[in-house]
């Protein structure tokens, strides 16, 4: 029987800068016709500091991850970076080659590891997780490191300058926040913990609902165009069915001490997904109490979103050791997925290094 893969360590870096939704919308050349804060529930989000870029977010998250880990960088057999953002210097300088994983090797001794990048929109970290899990179960490696540093607020700055309509395809750029995440995966011989199953798939016919490319304007950088209404309507319906099939008739349907972590795009989107899951299953498996929501103070953190939410709720005491998590993955592509996971003592080990956050970071959807 194939053994489970467990998250041996998790490191999250949140930059100190903050930007409110009101400040963002007030800075738009054309003011949005909607109240972005009311529609999304996002009040504020973290923003990189001066001379801080995507590579810095990744590097600081990796450093924190190894503070908590029992391992060192040279113990890694596989390193995969999944960040969408490649902003690594002033004037929107972007690095595509060498890979982010290779660039990080100047700070960490990954000498024996296979290293490469595997960006896949907001599903990137789970795509890499799936790859590392497969390598481990095939006996090819003992452990792997997955990293993402998302400097996304450059999209926000460009949207403020470029939006032409009160309902504009760059509106989603006003909801993002910056963050870095790194986690280590390894095999466990305990069948009660780790990833019990993962299922990811892509519906590529909807590729055009979210597109990012270089800006054509003189100021440079990147832009993102999103049909938020269509992408949410498609993703939420399919997620409800996907999650429903994974939990209905299993112990996860009635389990205590379990949590649902969906992609953190907006409070309303999470609430609608929660209700749609319950409608599909026919009972309240996904409640206000067990649905994780940190988007009001983080914004949409793209590929890092699920693990920033996990980190926040570990630090505020909302998620504890030995509890169950169902991750629902949603991203442009459209990429969708579900993963069922049971924690070991990771929350205790994180809190032994990181101070607890007494103030709750999130609100319920």
Image (cartoon, helix red, strand yellow):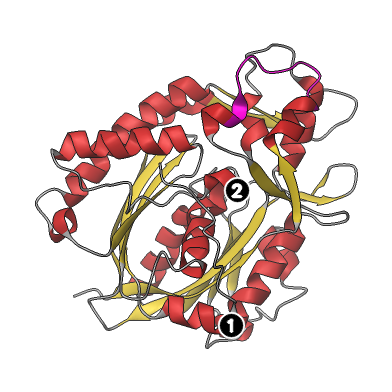
Is residue 312 found left or right of 172 in the rendered image?
A: left
Position of the C terminus by quadrant:
top left
Label 1 sits on residue: 353
Picture residue at 70% right of the left edge, 11% below the top: 165
Q: Residues within 10 Å of mark 2 (few under 14, many from 20)?
A: many
Is residue 140 found left or right of 34 in the rendered image?
A: left
The x and y percentages for residue 359 are 55, 62
Task: Residue lying at the far front in this picture: please name it.
Answer: 359
Q: Main secondary structure of the magenta part?
A: loop
Picture residue at 52% right of the left edge, 62% below the top: 312
Bounds of the magenta segment? 27-37
Q: Nearer the viewer, residue 226 or 102?
A: 226
Q: Are marks 2 and 1 in contact (CB under 8 Å)?
A: no
Q: Is residue 282 magenta?
A: no
The x and y percentages for residue 124 are 52, 50
Picture residue at 40% right of the left edge, 59% below the top: 130
Q: Residues within 10 Å of mark 1 (few under 14, many from 20)?
A: few
The x and y percentages for residue 138 are 34, 72
Q: Tell me if residue 177 comes above or below residue 350 in the rendering.
A: above
Question: Considering only order in the chain, which callout, 1 or 2, is on the residue closer to the N terminus?
Answer: 2
Is residue 16 found left or right of 11 in the rendered image?
A: right
In front: label 2 or label 1: 2
Task: Residue lying at the far left in this picture: please name it.
Answer: 249
Query: Which of the 4 image quarters holds residue 25?
Result: top right
Label 2 sits on residue: 297
Q: Is residue 333 shown to the viewer in this render?
A: yes
**Which numbered tag is attached to residue 211?**
none
Q: Nearer the viewer, residue 358 or 189?
A: 358
Task: Residue lying at the far top in this picture: please name it.
Answer: 165
Q: Tell me if residue 306 comes above or below residue 102 in the rendering.
A: above
The x and y percentages for residue 13 are 66, 64
Q: Tell me if residue 99 comes above or below residue 32 in the rendering.
A: below
């Amino acid at each position: 029987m194939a053994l489970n893969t467990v998250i041996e360590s998790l490191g999250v870096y949140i930059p100190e800068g903050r930007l409110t939704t009101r400040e963002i919308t007030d800075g738009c050349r054309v003011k949005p016709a909607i109240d972005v804060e009311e529609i999304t529930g996002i009040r504020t989000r973290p923003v990189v500091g001066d001379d801080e870029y995507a590579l810095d977010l990744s590097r600081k998250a990796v450093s924190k991850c190894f503070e908590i880990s029992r391992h060192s960088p040279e113990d890694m057999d596989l390193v995969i970076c999944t960040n969408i953002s490649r902003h690594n210097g002033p004037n929107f300088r972007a690095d595509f080659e060498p890979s982010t994983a290779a660039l990080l090797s100047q700070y960490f001794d990954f000498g024996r590891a296979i290293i490469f990048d595997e960006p896949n929109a907001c599903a990137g970290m789970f795509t890499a997780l799936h790859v590392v899990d497969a390598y481990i179960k095939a006996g090819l490696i003992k452990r792997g490191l997955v990293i993402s540093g998302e400097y996304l607020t450059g999209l926000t700055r460009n949207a403020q300058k470029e939006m032409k309509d009160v309902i504009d395809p760059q509106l989603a750029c006003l909801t993002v926040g910056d963050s870095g995440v790194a986690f280590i995966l390894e095999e466990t011989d305990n069948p009660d913990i780790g990833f019990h199953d993962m299922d990811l798939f892509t519906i590529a016919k909807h590729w055009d609902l979210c597109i990012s490319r270089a800006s054509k304007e003189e100021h440079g950088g990147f832009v993102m165009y999103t049909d938020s209404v269509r992408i949410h309507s498609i993703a939420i319906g399919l997620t409800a069915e996907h999650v429903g099939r994974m939990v209905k008739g299993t112990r996860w349907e009635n389990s205590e001490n379990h949590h649902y972590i969906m992609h953190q795009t907006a409070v309303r989107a999470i609430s609608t997904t929660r209700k749609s899951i319950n409608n599909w299953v026919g009972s309240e498996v996904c409640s206000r109490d067990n649905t994780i929501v940190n988007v009001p103070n983080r914004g949409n953190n793209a590929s890092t979103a699920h693990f920033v939410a996990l980190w926040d709720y570990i630090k505020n005491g909302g998620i504890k050791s030995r509890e169950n998590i169902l991750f629902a993955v949603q991203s442009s592509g459209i990429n969708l997925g579900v993963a069922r996971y049971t924690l070991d003592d990771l929350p205790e080990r994180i809190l032994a290094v990181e101070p607890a956050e007494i103030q709750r970071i999130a609100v319920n959807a």
